[in-house]
Image (tube, helix red, strand yellow):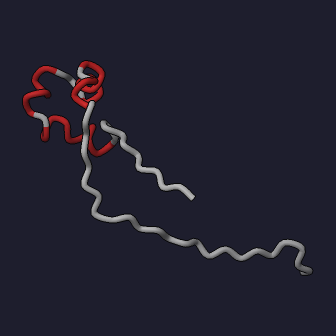
Amino acid sequence: MRIIFNLAFCGSVAGNRFQIDCKEECQVFDSCDDYIKSNPEKLNEAYWKIRGVYVYQRAWLRNWGADS
């Protein structure tokens, strides 16, 4: 079992908020992607606060080999 956290730095949320949240960087770079490509050293250390992890179980009915 594994849990994967997608750390898409310029995903749909970050990409849409670049001009709002990064006002100084926005004046130099056209997009979050451009900023990340030009400054990879800025991401040497990054931290996240995770408020919760939710695990759901999907109900699954298995009828293999059952007579109709």
| Residue drawn at 29 percent across, 58 percent down | 50
Side of 43 where 61 appears, left or right: right
Residue projecting furthest to the front: 45
| Residue drawn at 36 percent across, 40 percent down | 8
Residue projecting furthest to the bottom: 68
Residue nearest the viewer, comparing 47 with 55: 47
Quadrant position of residue 32: top left
Report x, y in % for residue 38: 25, 18
Side of 23 where 29 appears, left or right: right
Point out the image quarter for the C terminus. bottom right
Q: How many numbered badges does the structure rendering display? A: 0
Quadrant position of residue 52: bottom left
Report x, y in % for residue 1: 57, 59
Residue projecting furthest to the left: 24
Side of 15 where 68 appears, left or right: right
| Residue drawn at 81 percent across, 76 percent down | 63
| Residue drawn at 88 percent across, 78 percent down | 66
Residue nearest the viewer, comparing 51 with 30: 51
Task: Identify whether 14 is placed above or below 3.
Answer: above
Side of 62 where 43 appears, left or right: left
Report x, y in % for residue 57: 55, 72
